[in-house]
Image (cartoon, rainbow, N blue to C red):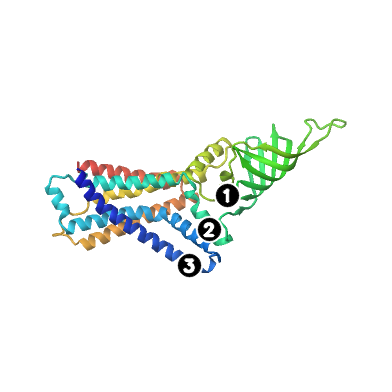
Amino acid sequence: MRIFFRFISGIYLKNFFIIFFSLLGFYCGVDLLLNFKDLPKAANLDLLYVMFLSFSAVPYVLPISLVFALVVCLVSMIRSNEFVSLHALGFSKNYIILFPFLWALFFCCVYIGLNFTSFAYANDYKRNILKNGTIMNQSGEVFLKLNNNFVYIWKINNGQNSAQNIKIFHLNDLNLSSFISAKNAHFESQSWVLKDGNITLLPKNYRLGNEGLKIKEFSQIRSLDGFKPKIIEGVASNSDYSISDALESFELFRAQNVNIDAPKISLYKFLFTPFFAPFLMLIMYYFFPVIARFFNLAFVTFVAFVVTLMIWGVLFLLTRLSENDVIISEIGIILPIVFLGFLSAYMYYKHR
Protein backbone atom coordinates (compact mmCIF):
# COMPACT_ATOMS: atom_id res chain seq x y z
CA MET A 1 0.00 0.00 0.00
CA ARG A 2 2.82 2.41 0.87
CA ILE A 3 4.53 1.77 -2.46
CA PHE A 4 1.30 2.34 -4.38
CA PHE A 5 0.60 5.52 -2.40
CA ARG A 6 4.04 6.92 -3.24
CA PHE A 7 3.68 5.87 -6.87
CA ILE A 8 0.24 7.34 -7.59
CA SER A 9 0.80 10.41 -5.39
CA GLY A 10 4.12 11.16 -7.08
CA ILE A 11 2.57 11.13 -10.55
CA TYR A 12 -0.49 13.16 -9.55
CA LEU A 13 1.29 15.77 -7.42
CA LYS A 14 4.01 16.31 -10.03
CA ASN A 15 1.41 17.03 -12.71
CA PHE A 16 -0.66 19.15 -10.32
CA PHE A 17 2.17 21.48 -9.33
CA ILE A 18 3.37 21.84 -12.92
CA ILE A 19 -0.12 22.74 -14.17
CA PHE A 20 -0.95 24.91 -11.13
CA PHE A 21 2.16 27.09 -11.35
CA SER A 22 1.94 27.23 -15.15
CA LEU A 23 -1.65 28.51 -15.05
CA LEU A 24 -0.76 30.85 -12.20
CA GLY A 25 2.14 32.29 -14.19
CA PHE A 26 -0.03 32.65 -17.28
CA TYR A 27 -2.76 34.45 -15.29
CA CYS A 28 -0.26 36.83 -13.68
CA GLY A 29 1.55 37.43 -16.97
CA VAL A 30 -1.62 38.40 -18.84
CA ASP A 31 -2.73 40.68 -15.98
CA LEU A 32 0.66 42.40 -15.81
CA LEU A 33 0.65 42.99 -19.56
CA LEU A 34 -2.82 44.56 -19.37
CA ASN A 35 -2.11 46.73 -16.32
CA PHE A 36 1.60 47.47 -16.73
CA LYS A 37 1.03 51.18 -17.40
CA ASP A 38 -1.09 51.58 -14.26
CA LEU A 39 1.38 49.97 -11.85
CA PRO A 40 2.90 52.32 -9.25
CA LYS A 41 6.48 53.50 -9.70
CA ALA A 42 7.74 51.66 -6.63
CA ALA A 43 9.45 48.26 -6.67
CA ASN A 44 8.05 47.17 -3.31
CA LEU A 45 4.47 47.91 -4.39
CA ASP A 46 5.06 46.09 -7.68
CA LEU A 47 6.24 43.01 -5.81
CA LEU A 48 3.27 43.21 -3.46
CA TYR A 49 0.97 43.56 -6.46
CA VAL A 50 2.39 40.38 -8.02
CA MET A 51 2.01 38.53 -4.72
CA PHE A 52 -1.60 39.61 -4.20
CA LEU A 53 -2.31 38.96 -7.87
CA SER A 54 -1.09 35.39 -7.42
CA PHE A 55 -3.24 34.95 -4.32
CA SER A 56 -6.32 36.31 -6.10
CA ALA A 57 -5.78 33.86 -8.97
CA VAL A 58 -5.86 30.78 -6.72
CA PRO A 59 -9.70 30.48 -6.62
CA TYR A 60 -9.75 30.23 -10.42
CA VAL A 61 -6.58 28.21 -11.00
CA LEU A 62 -6.72 25.66 -8.17
CA PRO A 63 -9.91 23.72 -9.15
CA ILE A 64 -8.94 23.52 -12.81
CA SER A 65 -5.41 22.39 -11.94
CA LEU A 66 -6.73 19.59 -9.73
CA VAL A 67 -8.88 18.19 -12.55
CA PHE A 68 -6.31 18.72 -15.31
CA ALA A 69 -3.65 16.99 -13.19
CA LEU A 70 -5.81 13.87 -12.94
CA VAL A 71 -6.44 13.88 -16.70
CA VAL A 72 -2.71 14.13 -17.49
CA CYS A 73 -1.93 11.54 -14.83
CA LEU A 74 -4.41 9.03 -16.28
CA VAL A 75 -3.33 9.60 -19.88
CA SER A 76 0.32 9.09 -18.91
CA MET A 77 -0.50 5.86 -17.05
CA ILE A 78 -2.71 4.54 -19.87
CA ARG A 79 -0.07 5.17 -22.55
CA SER A 80 2.65 3.43 -20.55
CA ASN A 81 0.27 0.54 -19.71
CA GLU A 82 0.67 1.28 -15.99
CA PHE A 83 -3.07 1.68 -15.58
CA VAL A 84 -3.91 -1.78 -16.92
CA SER A 85 -1.01 -3.23 -14.94
CA LEU A 86 -2.52 -1.94 -11.70
CA HIS A 87 -5.78 -3.67 -12.59
CA ALA A 88 -3.87 -6.85 -13.36
CA LEU A 89 -2.24 -6.69 -9.92
CA GLY A 90 -5.70 -6.74 -8.33
CA PHE A 91 -6.21 -3.03 -7.59
CA SER A 92 -9.86 -2.08 -7.97
CA LYS A 93 -10.95 0.94 -10.00
CA ASN A 94 -12.11 2.71 -6.84
CA TYR A 95 -8.83 2.10 -5.03
CA ILE A 96 -6.72 3.58 -7.82
CA ILE A 97 -8.57 6.92 -7.69
CA LEU A 98 -8.65 7.04 -3.88
CA PHE A 99 -5.37 8.86 -3.22
CA PRO A 100 -5.67 11.50 -6.00
CA PHE A 101 -9.19 12.18 -4.74
CA LEU A 102 -7.93 12.56 -1.16
CA TRP A 103 -5.14 14.89 -2.32
CA ALA A 104 -7.72 17.04 -4.10
CA LEU A 105 -9.83 17.18 -0.93
CA PHE A 106 -6.72 18.11 1.04
CA PHE A 107 -5.87 21.05 -1.25
CA CYS A 108 -9.49 22.23 -1.12
CA CYS A 109 -9.41 22.16 2.69
CA VAL A 110 -6.11 24.08 2.70
CA TYR A 111 -7.70 26.70 0.43
CA ILE A 112 -10.72 26.97 2.75
CA GLY A 113 -8.39 27.34 5.74
CA LEU A 114 -6.50 30.16 4.03
CA ASN A 115 -9.79 32.00 3.52
CA PHE A 116 -10.18 32.31 7.29
CA THR A 117 -7.25 34.74 7.11
CA SER A 118 -6.47 37.96 5.21
CA PHE A 119 -5.73 35.77 2.18
CA ALA A 120 -9.41 36.27 1.27
CA TYR A 121 -8.80 40.01 0.79
CA ALA A 122 -5.94 39.62 -1.70
CA ASN A 123 -8.12 40.85 -4.56
CA ASP A 124 -8.98 44.03 -2.62
CA TYR A 125 -5.31 44.70 -1.82
CA LYS A 126 -4.37 44.15 -5.47
CA ARG A 127 -7.08 46.56 -6.64
CA ASN A 128 -6.01 49.20 -4.09
CA ILE A 129 -2.38 49.08 -5.29
CA LEU A 130 -3.47 49.42 -8.90
CA LYS A 131 -5.92 52.29 -8.35
CA ASN A 132 -4.49 54.18 -5.37
CA GLY A 133 -0.83 53.18 -5.18
CA THR A 134 -1.25 51.79 -1.65
CA ILE A 135 -2.42 48.58 -0.01
CA MET A 136 -4.90 50.35 2.21
CA ASN A 137 -7.88 52.25 0.90
CA GLN A 138 -10.47 54.67 2.16
CA SER A 139 -14.10 53.73 1.72
CA GLY A 140 -16.72 56.38 1.18
CA GLU A 141 -19.79 57.26 3.19
CA VAL A 142 -21.77 54.48 4.83
CA PHE A 143 -24.97 54.46 6.89
CA LEU A 144 -25.71 51.38 9.02
CA LYS A 145 -28.02 50.14 11.77
CA LEU A 146 -26.85 48.42 14.96
CA ASN A 147 -29.52 47.51 17.52
CA ASN A 148 -31.13 50.85 18.44
CA ASN A 149 -28.37 52.90 16.83
CA PHE A 150 -28.05 54.32 13.35
CA VAL A 151 -24.41 54.90 12.46
CA TYR A 152 -23.10 57.30 9.84
CA ILE A 153 -19.40 57.18 8.89
CA TRP A 154 -17.95 59.68 6.50
CA LYS A 155 -14.76 57.77 5.69
CA ILE A 156 -13.30 54.39 6.69
CA ASN A 157 -9.57 53.75 6.57
CA ASN A 158 -9.58 50.18 5.30
CA GLY A 159 -7.06 47.91 6.98
CA GLN A 160 -6.24 50.47 9.68
CA ASN A 161 -9.29 49.86 11.91
CA SER A 162 -10.04 53.57 12.01
CA ALA A 163 -12.71 55.96 10.75
CA GLN A 164 -13.29 59.69 10.39
CA ASN A 165 -16.32 61.83 11.19
CA ILE A 166 -18.55 59.23 12.81
CA LYS A 167 -22.08 60.01 14.01
CA ILE A 168 -24.28 57.72 16.12
CA PHE A 169 -28.02 58.29 16.46
CA HIS A 170 -29.60 56.44 19.40
CA LEU A 171 -33.34 55.75 19.18
CA ASN A 172 -35.67 54.91 22.05
CA ASP A 173 -39.18 53.77 21.03
CA LEU A 174 -38.61 55.24 17.57
CA ASN A 175 -37.70 58.60 19.08
CA LEU A 176 -34.25 60.13 18.88
CA SER A 177 -32.89 60.20 22.44
CA SER A 178 -29.21 61.04 21.95
CA PHE A 179 -26.71 61.91 19.29
CA ILE A 180 -22.94 61.31 19.34
CA SER A 181 -20.52 63.00 16.99
CA ALA A 182 -16.76 62.34 16.87
CA LYS A 183 -13.99 63.45 14.55
CA ASN A 184 -11.98 60.23 14.77
CA ALA A 185 -12.50 56.65 15.92
CA HIS A 186 -10.53 53.44 16.01
CA PHE A 187 -11.46 49.85 16.79
CA GLU A 188 -9.87 48.39 19.89
CA SER A 189 -10.76 45.39 22.09
CA GLN A 190 -14.02 44.57 20.30
CA SER A 191 -15.39 48.13 20.48
CA TRP A 192 -14.93 51.53 18.86
CA VAL A 193 -13.05 54.26 20.72
CA LEU A 194 -14.48 57.65 19.73
CA LYS A 195 -12.23 60.68 20.15
CA ASP A 196 -12.72 64.47 20.16
CA GLY A 197 -16.48 64.70 19.98
CA ASN A 198 -19.67 65.53 21.84
CA ILE A 199 -22.85 63.89 23.05
CA THR A 200 -26.19 65.61 22.57
CA LEU A 201 -28.93 64.41 24.96
CA LEU A 202 -32.46 65.22 23.87
CA PRO A 203 -35.31 65.69 26.39
CA LYS A 204 -37.92 62.94 26.79
CA ASN A 205 -40.84 65.37 26.82
CA TYR A 206 -40.92 68.42 24.62
CA ARG A 207 -42.84 70.90 26.75
CA LEU A 208 -42.43 74.58 27.18
CA GLY A 209 -40.42 75.34 30.31
CA ASN A 210 -38.91 71.86 30.66
CA GLU A 211 -35.22 71.20 30.50
CA GLY A 212 -33.87 71.35 26.96
CA LEU A 213 -31.14 69.39 25.25
CA LYS A 214 -27.70 68.93 26.79
CA ILE A 215 -24.39 68.90 24.96
CA LYS A 216 -21.36 67.30 26.59
CA GLU A 217 -17.85 67.35 25.19
CA PHE A 218 -15.62 64.30 25.52
CA SER A 219 -12.07 63.37 24.63
CA GLN A 220 -12.64 59.61 24.45
CA ILE A 221 -15.54 57.17 24.92
CA ARG A 222 -16.32 53.59 23.85
CA SER A 223 -19.31 52.56 21.77
CA LEU A 224 -20.58 50.09 19.11
CA ASP A 225 -19.41 46.88 20.79
CA GLY A 226 -18.71 44.04 18.35
CA PHE A 227 -19.16 46.18 15.24
CA LYS A 228 -15.91 45.11 13.54
CA PRO A 229 -14.26 47.26 10.83
CA LYS A 230 -14.27 44.44 8.26
CA ILE A 231 -18.04 44.27 8.54
CA ILE A 232 -18.32 47.99 7.82
CA GLU A 233 -15.75 47.82 5.02
CA GLY A 234 -17.66 44.98 3.38
CA VAL A 235 -20.83 47.08 3.30
CA ALA A 236 -19.08 50.27 2.22
CA SER A 237 -16.99 48.84 -0.64
CA ASN A 238 -18.96 45.67 -1.56
CA SER A 239 -15.78 43.63 -1.11
CA ASP A 240 -15.55 39.96 -0.30
CA TYR A 241 -15.40 38.69 3.25
CA SER A 242 -13.10 36.15 4.84
CA ILE A 243 -14.94 33.15 6.25
CA SER A 244 -14.59 34.33 9.84
CA ASP A 245 -15.74 37.87 8.98
CA ALA A 246 -18.58 36.50 6.86
CA LEU A 247 -19.84 34.40 9.78
CA GLU A 248 -19.77 37.39 12.11
CA SER A 249 -21.43 39.62 9.51
CA PHE A 250 -24.07 36.98 8.87
CA GLU A 251 -25.02 36.78 12.55
CA LEU A 252 -24.94 40.54 13.02
CA PHE A 253 -26.98 41.36 9.89
CA ARG A 254 -29.53 38.68 10.66
CA ALA A 255 -30.01 40.07 14.19
CA GLN A 256 -30.51 43.55 12.71
CA ASN A 257 -32.95 42.32 10.01
CA VAL A 258 -30.49 43.52 7.36
CA ASN A 259 -29.97 41.88 3.98
CA ILE A 260 -27.57 38.95 4.55
CA ASP A 261 -26.99 38.02 0.90
CA ALA A 262 -23.43 39.40 0.66
CA PRO A 263 -21.86 37.48 3.58
CA LYS A 264 -23.95 34.40 2.76
CA ILE A 265 -22.69 34.30 -0.83
CA SER A 266 -19.09 34.75 0.35
CA LEU A 267 -19.55 31.81 2.72
CA TYR A 268 -21.03 29.63 0.00
CA LYS A 269 -18.25 30.51 -2.46
CA PHE A 270 -15.50 29.62 0.00
CA LEU A 271 -17.09 26.52 1.55
CA PHE A 272 -18.79 24.83 -1.43
CA THR A 273 -17.35 25.97 -4.76
CA PRO A 274 -13.83 24.46 -4.35
CA PHE A 275 -15.26 20.95 -4.00
CA PHE A 276 -16.44 20.93 -7.58
CA ALA A 277 -12.92 19.78 -8.53
CA PRO A 278 -12.66 16.52 -6.51
CA PHE A 279 -16.26 15.60 -7.35
CA LEU A 280 -15.69 16.20 -11.08
CA MET A 281 -12.44 14.23 -10.89
CA LEU A 282 -14.31 11.24 -9.50
CA ILE A 283 -16.99 11.45 -12.20
CA MET A 284 -14.59 11.84 -15.15
CA TYR A 285 -12.26 9.11 -13.93
CA TYR A 286 -14.75 6.32 -14.63
CA PHE A 287 -15.09 7.34 -18.29
CA PHE A 288 -11.38 6.85 -19.06
CA PRO A 289 -10.37 3.64 -20.86
CA VAL A 290 -8.09 1.09 -19.23
CA ILE A 291 -5.90 0.66 -22.32
CA ALA A 292 -5.19 2.93 -25.29
CA ARG A 293 -5.49 0.29 -28.01
CA PHE A 294 -9.12 0.96 -28.95
CA PHE A 295 -9.32 4.65 -28.07
CA ASN A 296 -7.87 7.90 -29.34
CA LEU A 297 -6.28 9.30 -26.16
CA ALA A 298 -5.70 12.72 -27.73
CA PHE A 299 -9.43 13.06 -28.39
CA VAL A 300 -10.31 11.74 -24.91
CA THR A 301 -7.94 14.28 -23.34
CA PHE A 302 -9.37 17.10 -25.43
CA VAL A 303 -12.94 16.19 -24.44
CA ALA A 304 -11.94 15.99 -20.76
CA PHE A 305 -10.36 19.46 -20.87
CA VAL A 306 -13.33 20.98 -22.70
CA VAL A 307 -15.86 19.40 -20.32
CA THR A 308 -13.89 20.66 -17.31
CA LEU A 309 -13.76 24.22 -18.66
CA MET A 310 -17.46 24.15 -19.59
CA ILE A 311 -18.57 22.94 -16.15
CA TRP A 312 -16.27 25.44 -14.44
CA GLY A 313 -17.67 28.21 -16.68
CA VAL A 314 -21.27 27.26 -15.88
CA LEU A 315 -20.54 27.26 -12.14
CA PHE A 316 -18.80 30.63 -12.45
CA LEU A 317 -21.79 32.02 -14.35
CA LEU A 318 -24.24 30.72 -11.74
CA THR A 319 -22.14 32.30 -8.99
CA ARG A 320 -22.21 35.67 -10.77
CA LEU A 321 -25.97 35.42 -11.24
CA SER A 322 -26.32 34.71 -7.53
CA GLU A 323 -24.17 37.71 -6.62
CA ASN A 324 -26.40 39.94 -8.79
CA ASP A 325 -29.62 38.56 -7.22
CA VAL A 326 -30.79 37.02 -10.49
CA ILE A 327 -31.15 33.61 -8.81
CA ILE A 328 -30.99 32.66 -5.14
CA SER A 329 -27.57 31.59 -3.92
CA GLU A 330 -28.72 28.17 -2.74
CA ILE A 331 -29.67 27.27 -6.32
CA GLY A 332 -26.76 29.04 -8.01
CA ILE A 333 -23.94 27.88 -5.73
CA ILE A 334 -24.92 25.01 -3.44
CA LEU A 335 -27.23 22.96 -5.69
CA PRO A 336 -24.70 22.35 -8.53
CA ILE A 337 -22.01 21.22 -6.06
CA VAL A 338 -24.45 18.95 -4.22
CA PHE A 339 -25.54 17.49 -7.57
CA LEU A 340 -21.92 16.77 -8.54
CA GLY A 341 -21.36 15.25 -5.10
CA PHE A 342 -24.32 12.88 -5.43
CA LEU A 343 -23.31 11.94 -8.98
CA SER A 344 -19.73 11.19 -7.93
CA ALA A 345 -20.99 9.10 -4.99
CA TYR A 346 -23.24 7.17 -7.35
CA MET A 347 -20.33 6.49 -9.74
CA TYR A 348 -18.14 5.34 -6.87
CA TYR A 349 -20.87 3.05 -5.52
CA LYS A 350 -21.61 1.68 -8.98
CA HIS A 351 -17.99 0.57 -9.48
CA ARG A 352 -17.42 -0.74 -5.96
| Mark 2, secondary structure of its residue | helix
Q: Residue at x 66, y 47 (%)?
A: 153
Q: Amino acid at mark 3?
A: Leu
- Labels 2 and 1 touching (C-beta < 8 A): no
| Mark 3, secondary structure of its residue | helix
Other-residue count near label 2 (Cα within 10 Å), few / some / many at <14 / 14–19 / ≥20:
some
Mark 1 = which residue?
A: 159
Mark 2 = which residue?
A: 127
Mark 3 = which residue?
A: 34
Task: Reply above or below: 153 against 171.
Answer: below
Q: Which quarter of the rendered picture does the N terminus lie within? A: top left
Image location of residue 237, percent across then percent down: 57, 51
Task: Reply above or below: 289 against 258.
Answer: below
Image location of residue 159, percent across then percent down: 57, 49
| Mark closer to the chain start, 2 or 1 | 2
- Labels 2 and 3 touching (C-beta < 8 A): no
How far apart are the alpha carbons under marks 1 and 3? 27 Å
Image location of residue 210, percent across then percent down: 85, 30
How far apart are the alpha carbons under marks 2 and 3? 14 Å
Q: Which quarter of the rendered picture does the C terminus lie within? A: top left
| Mark closer to the chain start, 2 or 3 | 3
Other-residue count near label 3 (Cα within 10 Å), few / some / many at <14 / 14–19 / ≥20:
few
Image location of residue 161, percent across then percent down: 60, 46
Whether residue 290 can be seen here = no
Q: Amino acid at mark 2?
A: Arg
